[in-house]
Image (spheres, grey):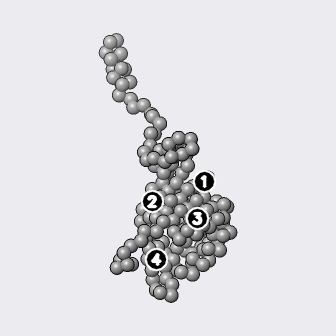
Amino acid sequence: MKKYILLFAILLSSCETQTEPTGSGYWIAEDGNEKFVNASDDYTDIFKAWVEAHNEKDIDKVLSYETEDVILDLPDGTLIEGKEAHSQGLENYFNLDPELNLFWALPYVGVNNAEVWIIAGSVEDTTNEEGKQSRLLMVDAQFTEDKLSRIIFYEKARPSSQN
C-alpha cells in the first residue's frame, strides 16, 4: 500500500498547474499597469485579409473588416473617423495604385483589460506623377468584436539614397 501512496504522491507532484498568464511589456492604464500576451492568429488572418482587400482595391471589402466608427491615424497627422470618411479616402488612395506587402504581424491582448491589438509592418508601393514610390509603414490596430476599430499608421523614413 505504501508503494501506491508513494506512486500517487509522485504523480501529483509532477502535474503542472495552470496559472494565469502574467504577460510582458508595460502600459500605464487607468485601472493599473497593463501587461500583454499573444492573441490568436485569427486576428492576424483578419488583418491580412484587410491588407489584401486594399491590394484588390475593393472598398466594400476593406470596410467589411472595420467597425462603423473606425478611426484611422495616418502618418501625416490626418485623422479619418468612420466608414463613410474612410470610403472617400480610399477612392483617392486607390488612384495611387497602391500595393501593400505585409512582412510581419503580431497580435496581442491585454491581460487585465482584454483589449486586442496587432502590430504589423508593411512596405507600401504607390505610383504618382513623380513615378513609383515606396515607404515602410508600421501599424498598430485595435480590434473590437473581431473588427478593426482603431488603426494607427507610422512611417519609417529612409535615407533618400534608399528610396
Q: Earlier in the sequence, mark 4 or mark 3?
A: 3
Cβ–Cβ under 8 Å for marks 3 and 1: no
Instruction: Tell me which residue sits at (45%, 56%) in the image.
Output: 106
Q: Secondary structure at mark 4?
A: strand
The type of residue carrying mark 2 is Ala
The C terminus lies in quadrant: bottom left
Measuring from the top left, give residue 36's x and y in whole percent: 47, 46
Instruction: Tell me which residue sits at (52%, 73%) in the image.
Output: 55
- Whole-angstrom CA distance, mark 3 to mark 2, is 18 Å
Q: Which disc is residue 144 wearing?
A: 1
Q: Which residue is mark 4?
A: 125
Q: Which disc is residue 105 wearing?
A: 2
As drawn, which residue projects farthest toward the left? Answer: 3
Q: Is residue 36 visible?
A: no
Depth order, front residue of 159/151: 159
Q: Secondary structure at mark 3?
A: strand
Please tell me whether residue 118 is drawn above or below residue 11 in the rendered image: below
Q: Earlier in the sequence, mark 2 or mark 1?
A: 2
Q: Residues within 10 Å of mark 3 (few under 14, many from 20)?
A: many
Q: Which residue is mark 3?
A: 72
The type of residue carrying mark 4 is Asp
The type of residue carrying mark 3 is Leu
